[in-house]
Image (cartoon, grey):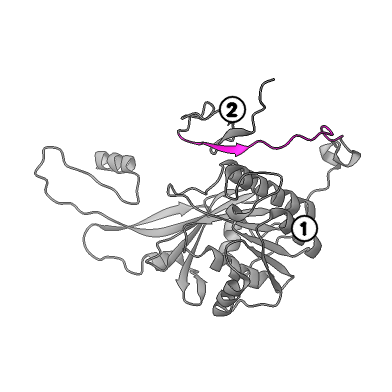
């Protein structure tokens, strides 16, 4: 009798599976994207029977979700979300280490805690470390409950028993499930943890924020299906050597995409910039070659400065370089001029 395979190789980009490792995924043709993970154990009882509560129903008999959105107290962040937090929505926030993801969500937790309890789950820091940061930010609200746990099943049980106004998981890569035998942070564990939290959020109508790590390529670590599972994907961008931060929506089932919120990092937390155009033009150069351009991001325009520097070239073909603007667009503009 042939030996039953215990592992499978899953593509981190498209989620397709292969019984052996391949250098290139046969479905999405991505290179070096197959990761090994154990196969789930089969259920000896067979597939579950369809209950009456889960039977298909006509669309005109389904009650629409009419619960009002919950505002975070941060107008720009509410704009990025499409008007506020949606009950039962799952928001994935990604960004480089040290950019301020935990700081932002702790400030959001402090504002949401004025309307109800907030559960802050940490798989990386101890409650003492989070409490120390909260006191520094002025966000040590008694309505925030800290839970140091990495088991996604126990986290789901805590959410169900507590029924908070919102839950924050820091981070999704540290969560693990007993239904998957691989280590925490693997493709299978990240997918299983996200699916468990997504089902919990939809069943209890509780918004959940997930913090995601960033790879060296600038994408959220884990399978690409992680971004497909959640409702909203936000990227927290910024240079750690500067105080400016940007939050950009790359996916939003409840609002427009490409919305941008601008913040300034201080010792006591993040401060919203109400007029981003004025902040971007505060240090505008008065030299020749500077121009103001109106760029549309999401549903509102931003005024930004574009600088051009021209110098004589000793080569037959001049070299053209661009930073912050598409090189092909630059070539088209030069050809028109």
Residue 213 x/y as whole percent: 52, 54
Question: Can you identify the residue that label 2 sits on?
Answer: 19
Q: Considering only order in the chain, which callout, 2 or 1, is on the residue closer to the N terminus?
A: 2
Residue 28 appears left or right of 168: left
Question: Which residue is the extreme one toward the left?
Answer: 314
Residue 268 inside the magenta-drawn segment: no
- Quadrant holding the C terminus: top left
Question: Can you identify the residue that label 1 sits on?
Answer: 157
- Quadrant holding the N terminus: top right
Q: Residue at x 52, y 51 (%)?
A: 258
Label 1 vs label 2: CA separation?
A: 34 Å
Magenta region:
32-49
Give the SS element for disc 1: helix
Q: Residue at x 75, y 52 (%)?
A: 200
Residue 132 appears left or right of 57: left
Q: Residue at x 71, y 60 (%)?
A: 69
Residue 158 x/y as whole percent: 76, 61
């Amino acid at each position: 009798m042939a030996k039953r395979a215990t592992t499978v190789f899953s593509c981190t980009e498209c989620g397709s599976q292969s019984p052996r490792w391949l250098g290139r995924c046969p479905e999405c043709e991505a290179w070096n994207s197959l990761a090994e993970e154990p196969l789930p154990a089969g259920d000896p009882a067979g597939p579950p029977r369809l209950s009456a509560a889960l039977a298909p129903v006509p669309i005109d008999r389904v009650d629409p979700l009419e619960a009002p959105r919950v505002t975070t107290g941060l107008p720009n962040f509410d704009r990025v979300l499409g008007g506020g937090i949606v009950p039962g929505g799952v928001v994935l926030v990604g960004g480089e280490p040290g950019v301020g993801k935990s700081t932002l969500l702790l400030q959001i937790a402090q504002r949401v805690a004025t309307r109800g309890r907030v559960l802050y789950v940490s798989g990386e820091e101890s409650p003492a470390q989070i409490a120390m940061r909260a006191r520094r930010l002025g966000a040590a609200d008694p309505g925030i409950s800290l839970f140091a746990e990495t088991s996604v099943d126990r986290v789901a049980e805590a959410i169900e028993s507590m029924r908070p106004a919102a839950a924050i998981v820091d981070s999704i890569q540290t969560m693990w499930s007993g239904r998957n035998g691989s280590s925490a942070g693997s493709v299978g564990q990240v997918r299983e943890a996200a699916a468990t939290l997504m089902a919990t959020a939809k069943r209890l109508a509780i918004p959940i924020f997930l913090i995601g790590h960033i790879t060296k390529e600038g994408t959220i670590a884990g399978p690409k299906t992680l971004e497909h599972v959640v409702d909203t994907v936000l990227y927290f961008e910024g240079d750690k050597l500067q105080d400016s931060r940007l939050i950009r929506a790359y996916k939003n089932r409840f609002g427009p995409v490409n919305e941008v919120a601008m913040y300034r990092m201080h010792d006591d937390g993040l401060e919203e910039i109400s007029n981003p155009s004025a902040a971007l033009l505060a240090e505008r150069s008065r030299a020749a070659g500077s121009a103001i351009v109106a760029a549309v991001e999401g549903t509102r325009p931003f005024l930004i400065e574009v600088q051009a520097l021209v110098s004589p070239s000793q080569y037959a073909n001049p070299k053209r370089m661009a930073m912050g603007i598409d090189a092909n667009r630059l070539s088209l503009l030069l050809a028109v001029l």
